[in-house]
Image: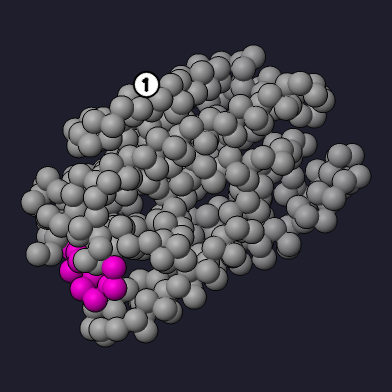
Amino acid sequence: MNYTFAGKTKMLTLALMGIGLASIVYGFVVTPERVWANLLLNGFFYMAIALAGTFFIAVNYVGEAGWHSGFKRIPEAMSSYLPIGAIVMLALVITGLLGVHDIWHWMDHHFQETDEVYLNSGKKVYLSNTFYAIRTVVYLAGWVLLAMQFRKISLKEDTMPGLEMHKKGLVWGATFLVFFAVTSSMSAWDWLMSIDVHWYSTLFGWYIFAGLFVSGIIMMMLILLHLKRQGLMEWVNENHIHDLAKFMFAFSIFWTYLWFSQYMLIWYSNIPEEINYFLDRFNTDYRYIVIPMLAINFAFPLLILMHRDAKRTPWLLTIVGAILLVGHYLDLFQIIMPGTVKDKWNIGFTEIGMVLGFLGLFLFVVLSTLSKHALVPKNHPFLNESKQHHI
C-alpha cells in the first residue's frame, strides 16, 4: 500500500508555508536583521535533519544492518529536502559575501584589514571570502549528489532483484561517511562557529553533529508514527520503534556530554576569548533560552525515556519527540542569535512563523516524496530480516 499525501495533511503543510511567508514579509518590514538570522537558523536546522537521514542510510549500508530496511524510505524521503536546504544556505552565503546582511561580520573588508585576531591567526587564510564560498559549494554539492545517489539505487533495486544495487549502496555509503566525517565539522565551523569569529572550540563539530543526528532520528520516528496511525507500514513493529527511541535517548545523552565537556573546559581555563562566548549567554537575557534548552535536551529524555515501556508507547514518543525538537531548535537559537542580532533578539511572530513555515516546507517535500513510490523496498536483501526484527 502506498502513502497518499492529500486532504488535511497537505492543506496543513501549505497553511504552515503561508504563515512562514507572511512572517518573513513582516520581519523584513520591522526588523530585517532578525529575518536573516532566522533564515540561517531554520535553513540549517531543517537541512541538518535531512542530512541526518542521509547519514542514517549510509551508516546502515556500511554496517550491513537489516533492521531499518522496512522503513528506509523515510530517511530517503527526508534526504529529498537537501536540495532546498542547500539553496537556502548557498543564498545566505552569497548575500553575505555581497554585503546584504552581516550574519558573518568577518566578511566585511574593513574587518579583514583591521582586526588583530583575524590578521594574526590562521583565520585570515581559512576565513577568506573566496575559500569560504568554495567550501560551501563543495559541502552542499557533495551532500546533495550523494543523497540523490542513494535514492536512485533504492528505486532501481525495486526492479532489479539480486545484490548488485545493494553492493553499490555499500560503496556509496562508505564514500558518504568519509566525506561527511570531514564536511560535517567544517560546515559547523564555517556557518555557525564563525559567527563569533574570535571564539573557537575543538568540540564544536561533534557537538553540532550530536544535535543534528538526534533531531533527524526524532523526525524519522515522528513520520513513522504518523504513517502507522494511517494504517500503513504494518510490517514495522514496536521493536523498530524501540530501537529508534534508544537512538533518541542515547544521542540526547551524548549531546549533553559534549555540551558539558565544551563548557567545563572553557570555564576551567578561563581564557578571555573563549569564556566570553558563555558570558554572552549566561550573563544576559539569553539565559532564559539556554537554561530551559538544557533541561529539555538532557533532563527530559533522561527522566522519561529511561524506562523500556516508554520507548514502546507511540503517543508518549510523539510528545517527547516534538518537545525535543523544540529543545534542539532552541540550542541553535542560542548559538546563532547572540552573535547576529545580539540584544535585539525576540521570540515573536517572525521567529514562530518562520520555524512553522520551514516545517511546512520540509513536510511538504518529504511527504510528497513518500507518496511517489512504494513504502516498502521490494528487493532489499534484508527486508525479511527487518520484518522479523525482535529485541
Q: Secondary structure at mark 1?
A: helix
Residue 56 pos. (x, y %): 42, 57
Observer-nearest of 13 and 232:
232
What is the magenta range? 370-382
Q: Position of residue 192 (x, y in %)?
A: 61, 43
From the top left corner, tell me how far across and down residue 138 is, in percent.
Answer: 61, 67
Residue 81 visible here? no
Predominant SS of the magenta segment: loop
Q: Quadrant of residue 198?
A: top right
Q: Label 1 belongs to which residue? A: 303
Q: Nearer the viewer, residue 133 or 50?
A: 50
Q: Residue at image x 59%, y 65%?
A: 179
45 over 319 or under it: above or below: below
- Residue 167, picture quadrant: bottom left
Q: Answer with left or right where residue 95 lies relative to residue 201.
A: left
Left/right of residue 237 with respect to residue 212 in the rendered view = left
Taking the magenta stretch, the answer to whether it contains residue 83 is no
Query: What's the residue type where badge 1 is placed?
Result: Leu
